[in-house]
């Protein structure tokens, strides 16, 4: 079973991706898929916290993300933050958008999840946790 990076490893990696994203107008060399930057407000601290996340767009043009944290046993901190305060900021390409994070459930969650995973990814093999799927209302789908 592959190991899950430590919180410190996630933070160091994420800082490099965030810097590259902002320096290159939303284009990064790693990871090898499109990303956005999600800024949440810390549930305990009240401070802004930014993370790079892969995203997808459904057939209705809604941008969504998944809280996988590489299959870690617990949800990522950013997910806890947006549950406490769903008002977020999303950087996508060269744009920055105020958004509302909506945690999906039931059939809607399963439908969106099925658009990005067949249920057999390495992340899923790391945990029994169900990965939350979050729609970012107010974020336009990229062209």
Image (cartoon, rainbow, N blue to C red):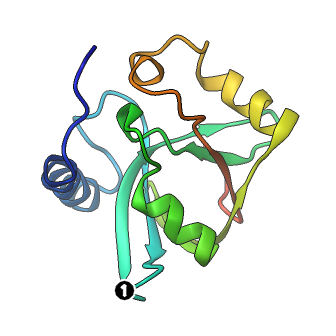
The x, y position of residue 80, in whole percent, is 52, 64
- Choose between 54 and 47: the one closer to the eye: 47
Q: Callout 1: helix, strand or loop?
A: loop
Q: Residue at x 18, y 58 (%)?
A: 15
The correct choice, above or below, for 15 with respect to 81 in the image is above
Q: Residue at x 18, y 45 (%)?
A: 6
User: What residue is shown with label 1?
Assistant: 47
The correct choice, above or below, for 97 with respect to 116 in the image is below
- Choose between 40 and 90: the one closer to the eye: 40
The x, y position of residue 98, in whole percent, is 60, 75
Spot the residue most to the right: 107
The correct choice, above or below, for 2 with respect to 46 in the image is above
Q: Quadrant of residue 3?
A: top left
The x, y position of residue 118, in whole percent, is 61, 12
The x, y position of residue 116, in whole percent, is 60, 24
Q: Is residue 89 visible?
A: no
């Amino acid at each position: 079973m592959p190991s899950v990076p430590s919180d410190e490893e996630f933070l160091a990696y994420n800082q490099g991706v965030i810097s590259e994203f902002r320096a290159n107008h939303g284009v990064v060399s790693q990871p090898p898929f499109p990303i956005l930057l999600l800024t949440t407000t810390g549930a305990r601290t009240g401070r802004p916290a930014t993370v790079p996340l892969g995203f997808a767009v459904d057939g209705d043009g809604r941008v969504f993300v998944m809280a996988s944290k590489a299959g870690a046993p617990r949800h990522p901190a950013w997910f806890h933050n947006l549950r406490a305060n769903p008002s977020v900021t999303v950087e996508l390409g060269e744009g920055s958008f105020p958004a509302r994070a909506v945690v999906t459930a039931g059939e809607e969650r399963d439908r969106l999840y099925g658009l990005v995973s067949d249920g057999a990814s390495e992340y899923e093999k790391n945990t029994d946790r169900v990965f939350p799927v979050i729609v970012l209302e107010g974020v336009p789908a990229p062209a």
